[in-house]
Amino acid sequence: MIYVIAKSVAKTSKIDETKKAMTALLEPTHNENGCIQYDLHQDQDKPEIFFFYERWESREILDKHLKSDHLKIWSDEQKELLAEPMEVIFLDKVDSRMQK
């Protein structure tokens, strides 16, 4: 399994448009094979900051997601909506039971 946290910072004047564009990614992504979790969060104190929290069955499946049509559209939209490039972090879960 692979975990992903993706941070986006919307232009102040484009917060609502950014939220709408990112929300549009939820349904098609939830329908993808291998998507375990794909949630969008908005910072309570800084509404221009958004995070996707994702869980995927494998890196190969995630790579397929990153080439999907809806992500290609989002990639184009980012140029207009975001104040800075999206920061994406790929994670492995550390399980204390595995260290015994």
Image: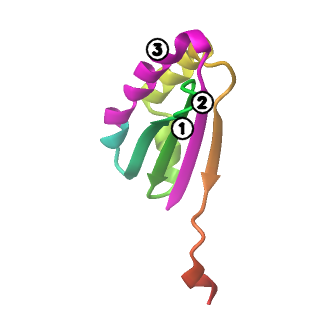
Q: Could you tell me the amino acid type at mark 1?
A: Phe
Tell me the tag on residue 51: 1
Residue 37 as seen in the image, left or right of residue 47: left
Q: Which residue reaches farthest bottom?
A: 100
| C-alpha span from label 3 to label 1 | 15 Å
Q: What residue is shown with label 3? A: 17
Q: Earlier in the sequence, mark 3 or mark 1?
A: 3
Reply yes or no: does residue 21 show up in magenta.
yes
Judge left or right: residue 21 versus residue 98: left
Q: Is residue 33 left or right of residue 86?
A: left
Q: What residue type is disc 2 on?
A: Ser
Residue at image x 63%, y 84%? 99
Q: Is there any visible trace of residue 69 in the rendered image?
A: no
x%, y% of residue 11?
61, 15
In this view of the protein, which residue sits in the foreground, 19 or 88?
19
Q: Which residue is mark 2?
A: 8
Q: Is residue 75 above or below residue 27?
A: above
Marked residue nearer the N-terminal end (1 or 2): 2
Element at badge 2? Answer: strand
